[in-house]
């Protein structure tokens, strides 16, 4: 007899990923607890859950990143498991351990896996031990060893934060004159973003392909891969468009990369859903980049080509059950593309956009999937990531998927808010993208130069200060102006902790 599923799951996240997890839970017949900040009082994830707990202020550190508040919400509602989604606490080993101490199931890998892969230097050492290919590099450089290490690795090179992620603490260096200043900036950014200033060094691959392999593991020794995703359309190391399978892939390369990904997962005893990321040179030599110990933003395209619900598998595995599929059960069916719809202004250096969604028209039709938390009246602030929705289109082949994606973007309207929808349409019509020959340099080749980084940083700081000053006023205005209790809209009782 298989282990029972959790009795009640708390989703420790917000917006589209919280909605995605809630839907999977409801399909399994499991009640769900949502948590929300002041800015998210009327969020779709709050409305769709069975219960909801207010966390307080809008700032992430005082809401979605406050472990004490999350655990208290679980205790108060009788939740028996926590799904962290991605971002926030999803890769926080301390939080995973605290969940276990509270008797809660953490729906994700073990804290030990997170620690092993969260430290990029340790991760490189683990992969080297089992023969997974690595980019030539040097671990843990300091100001004193920097110059000698750079000469050993060779230019151009990359400086990377050992505790890094999300494109933070990364600097490209093409010549020795740039080395020290780049190191100081990477070190400072790493210290601020992660509380760990450790920097390591790798040879810079010029415009490689960024290809990742989805993995699943359970506590019964089963580890499988669910093929690859092409993630080379990136801006400042942030993914913009992904597709599966990769148009750059060959059968031989897919087999080799899948085998390497499984080997990497077994090396650290991986359980649950994760992703092994690789850089692939133009000669199709591939090198380990990192393991993301969580569900990826782009997981829907893998679901579309395999028919496997990755969130359901996460819940099953965390409950002690075996994977529902084996490697021999899997095959690639068709082609899927995902475009990230963000609140940003491509005509103004991709500065974050804030405001109210006054009107909304969403696409549909065969093969179209929209993972979203958008609704008319949504207040978009600078407190959180700019991602509004993920538009996914499936086709019997890449050409059909592309046609559907272009049509879906043409139908998508978000007023009155600046978004990147038109920009995504431009990318999808770029000759390199259409031909499937693009690499990580595609956006630099097709786009005008962005404003200097310092300008963007200064503008973001000013915008954040403005958002902090007016957040309370906006929240009060939106609730008063709605004219209706969102809990009545949702058709259910008020949530625990709702003070309205």
Image (cartoon, rainbow, N blue to C red):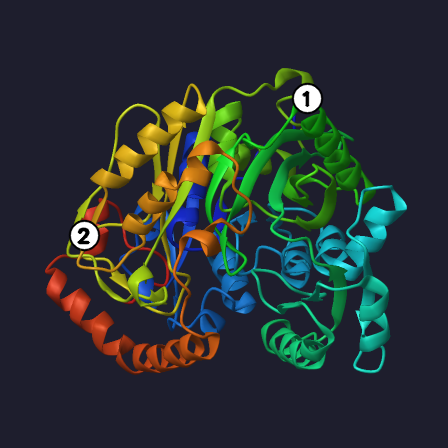
Looking at the picture, does residue 170 appear above or below residue 252? Answer: below
Where is residue 151 drawn, in percent x and y?
Answer: 83, 69
Tell me, yes or no, if residue 49 can be seen here. no
| Left-right relation of 14 to 363 | right
Where is residue 323 drawn, in percent x and y?
Answer: 65, 27
Residue closer to the observer: 385 or 445: 445
Q: Earlier in the sequence, mark 1 or mark 2?
A: 1
Image label count: 2
What residue did someone put label 1 on? 327
SS class, disc 2: loop
Q: Quadrant of residue 42?
A: bottom left
Looking at the picture, does residue 323 appear above or below residue 11? Answer: above
Residue at far right of view: 129
SS class, disc 1: helix
Q: What residue lies at 41% left-to-right and 38% top-to-bottom? A: 431
Within 10 Å of the Cα at label 2, are there few (<14), some (14-19), or many (20+) other Cα atoms?
few
Q: What residue lies at 20% left-to-right and 72% top-to-bottom? A: 476
What residue did someone put label 2 on? 376
Residue at far top of view: 329
Where is residue 393 drawn, in percent x and y?
Answer: 37, 31
Looking at the picture, does residue 88 appear above or below residue 218? Answer: below
Q: What residue lies at 18% left-to-right and 65% top-to-bottom? A: 479
Residue closer to the observer: 279 or 434: 434
Where is residue 74 drawn, in percent x and y?
Answer: 51, 56
Residue 415 shows which numbered tag? none
Within 10 Å of the Cα at label 1, are there few (<14), some (14-19), or many (20+) other Cα atoms?
few
Q: Quadrant of residue 336?
A: top left
Q: What residue lies at 67% left-to-right and 63% top-to-bottom? A: 94
Q: Quadrant of the C terminus?
A: bottom left
Q: Quadrant of the N terminus?
A: top right
């Amino acid at each position: 007899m298989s282990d029972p599923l959790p009795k009640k799951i708390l989703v420790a996240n917000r917006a589209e990923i919280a909605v995605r997890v809630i839907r999977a839970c409801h399909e399994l017949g499991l009640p769900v607890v949502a948590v929300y900040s002041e800015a998210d009082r009327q969020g779709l994830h709050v409305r769709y859950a069975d219960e909801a707990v207010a966390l307080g202020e809008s700032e992430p550190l005082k809401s979605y990143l406050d472990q004490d508040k999350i655990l208290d919400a679980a205790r108060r509602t009788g939740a028996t498991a926590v799904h962290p989604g991605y971002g926030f606490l999803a890769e926080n080993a301390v939080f995973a351990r605290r969940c276990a101490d509270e008797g809660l199931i953490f729906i994700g890998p073990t804290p030990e896996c997170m620690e092993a892969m969260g430290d990029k230097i340790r991760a490189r050492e683990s992969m080297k031990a089992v023969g997974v290919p690595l980019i030539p590099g040097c671990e843990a450089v300091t100001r004193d060893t920097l110059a000698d290490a750079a000469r050993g690795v060779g230019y151009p090179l990359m400086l990377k934060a050992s505790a890094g992620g999300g494109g933070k603490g990364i600097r490209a260096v093409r010549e020795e004159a740039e080395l020290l200043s780049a190191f100081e900036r990477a070190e400072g950014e790493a210290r601020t973003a992660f509380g760990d200033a450790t920097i390591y060094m790798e040879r810079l691959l010029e415009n490689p392909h960024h290809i990742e392999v989805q993995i699943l593991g359970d506590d019964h020794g089963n580890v499988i891969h669910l093929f690859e995703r092409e993630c080379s359309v990136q801006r400042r190391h942030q993914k913009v468009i992904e597709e599966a399978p990769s148009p750059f892939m060959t059968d031989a390369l897919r087999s080799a990369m899948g085998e390497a990904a499984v080997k990497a997962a077994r090396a650290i005893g991986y359980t649950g859903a994760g992703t092994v990321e690789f850089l692939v040179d133009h000669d199709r030599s591939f090198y380990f980049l990192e393991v993301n110990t969580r569900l990826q933003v782009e997981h829907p395209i893998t679901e579309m080509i395999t028919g496997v619900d990755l969130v359901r598998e996460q819940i099953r595995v965390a409950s002690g059950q075996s994977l529902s599929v084996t490697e021999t059960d899997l095959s690639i069916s068709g082609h899927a593309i995902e475009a990230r719809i963000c609140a940003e202004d491509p005509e103004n250096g991709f500065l974050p956009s804030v405001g109210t969604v006054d009107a909304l028209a969403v696409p549909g039709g065969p093969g179209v999937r929209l993972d979203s938390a958008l609704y008319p009246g949504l207040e978009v602030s600078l407190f959180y990531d700019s991602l509004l929705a993920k538009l996914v289109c499936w086709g019997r082949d890449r050409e059909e998927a592309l046609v559907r994606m272009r049509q879906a973007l043409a139908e998508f309207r978000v007023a009155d808010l600046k978004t990147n929808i038109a920009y995504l349409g431009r990318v999808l019509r770029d000759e390199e993208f259409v031909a499937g020959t693009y690499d990580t340099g595609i956006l630099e080749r097709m786009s005008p130069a962005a404003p200097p980084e310092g300008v963007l940083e200064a503008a973001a700081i000013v915008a954040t200060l403005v958002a902090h000053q007016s957040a309370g006023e906006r929240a009060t205005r939106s609730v008063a102006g709605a004219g209706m209790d969102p809990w009545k809209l949702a058709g259910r009782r008020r949530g625990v902790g709702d003070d309205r």
